[in-house]
Amino acid sequence: MMTRVDPDLASRAARPVSGLAPGAPHAVVIGAGLGGLASAMRLGAKGYRVTVLDRLDVPGGRGSALWRDGHRFDLGPTIVTVPQVFRELWAACGRNFDADVDLRPLDPFYRICWPDGSHFEMSGDESRVKAEIARLSPGDVAGYDRFLRDSEARYAFGFEDLGRRSMHRLWDLVKVLPRFGMLRADRSVHAHAARRFRDPRLRMAFSFHPLFIGGDPFRVTSMYILVSHLEKAFGVHCAIGGVAAIARAMADVIEGQGGRVRMGTEVDEIEVSGGRASGVRLKDGARLAADVVVSNADAGHTYDRLLRNHGRKRWTAARLKRSRWSMGLFVWYFGTRGTAGKWRDVGHHTILNGPRYRGLVDDIFLRGKLSEDMSLYVHRPAVTDPTVAPEGDDTFYALSPVPHLGFDDPVDWAEAGARYRQKVQAVLEEQLLPGLGAHLTASEVFTPLTFRDRYLAPYGSGFSIEPRILQSAWFRPHNVSEEVRGLYLTGAGTHPGAGLPGVVSSAEVLAQLVPDAVAAHRPVMAEAAE
């Protein structure tokens, strides 16, 4: 995809750096995704002179947006589940998140629909949720109480403890193994849900969440049931202006610290001198020296491409190829005319289930097969955010999990894409949005090919390396690189993982590893994090 330089950002990037100590060390951040922007904010707060580089034309990475005929298409994440991670990030920079971002709570959080016509609404009101469970399966209400207790215990350990500190030393893992055992981290999310609910619909409703961070619910660790506690304790929110508005506000903070955000600028290689990262070389051949290099590019791209001329011991091409990658995504973004008062039962978030759950998941993650049936996540932000569409109109996206491109016989999306979009439209018209075709206006389609080419995602995966138990914590690419001194990783492909809370927390972990900025010689900086 062609990129264009955002003239507003380009002009800001050219402004002189101010407000920094003389001789402040330079940090280069590769990628203006949410993890890269959060890392730049943290490093700016520590006194670094920061330059963020990104090949796209707007900040946000997967959380950016496209504008078509008055419609804003929010390309990736659509909700904020742990707003305090953003508030803490802003506070670390001496700023107030709520003064910069308009965050709105959603109620209900989402509706889940099944082919038999039944549905389930999730909200933050425990009594309402129990009533929903009782409507579907009265005998499962007690199981919900137990599931919530299980979820809270895993949140306290998995998110507040492990998720907010580095796991780059093997001893960090060894120390927590007994706790992993007590919490049965070996059990999958679905297996745990099956122990608490008898109704297969409720087993789905309380186990699908790993799909939103690229994980197979039948095989990722049950630690991820912590999401149910997150939703109940902190709610589900959307930002007016979308996640792209959060990204823009982050870029403003960075520039207010004296940093630079350079869009339309692609990094071709991380340069290494004397065994440590010394800067980056851009696609146009220009070089930027750095005391610290942070990569928010996918961990696979970082090691396989950006460090291609540097020998690697752990994250070799062979190991990356053997890794299990998250699924791909087919996303249809579309606008509709004159539908603001239409489809009144369709809320901000809807999940449409196909006739199969495990079979479809196995096709996606194990067989690499594009199934005839599908399940869809449907986003209708105009219900909450009037800025997303022209007055009286709507903006939607429909997301279908599909196989990534790394299977032996990958889906030929150049041939299959248009046909699959028509199938998505048919499902929507039959199950959710009758008469949709008569109202369609703007339209855009992303396939795994788009994710590969736009975001440089290995195999077109939607969420980097899949968060299975042996690809999490110490087993995941570390926040402080195992291969090169002075190089750090942030974002979905490193610890603690994908999702907005995860990528923002990766910057918090990084800030614990990178020393405070001092006007020191580079050799001191090079050894400080060891």
Image (tube, rainbow, N blue to C red):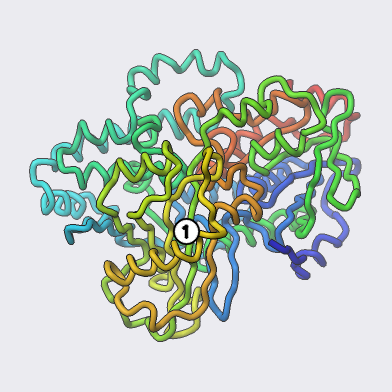
Q: Residue at x 36, y 38 (%)?
A: 217
In what element is the residue under mark 1? Answer: loop
Which quadrant holds the C terminus? top right
Q: Is residue 93 visible?
A: no
Which quadrant holds the N terminus? bottom right
* Count of numbered marks: 1
Residue of label 1: 78
Residue 158, located in which quarter of the rendered image? top left
Q: Nearer the viewer, residue 367 or 80?
A: 367
Residue 384 x, y percent position in the rendering: 41, 70
Q: Nearer the viewer, residue 312 or 47?
A: 312
Q: Nearer the viewer, residue 320 or 500?
A: 320
Residue 174 x, y percent position in the rendering: 50, 13
Q: Residue at x 32, y 79 (%)?
A: 435
Q: Is residue 4 visible?
A: yes
Residue 70 x, y percent position in the rendering: 56, 80
Residue 452 x, y percent position in the rendering: 62, 50
Residue 95, located in which quarter of the rendered image? bottom right
Q: Residue at x 77, y 65 (%)?
A: 5
Question: What amino acid is found at the position of numbered circle 1 in the picture?
Answer: Thr
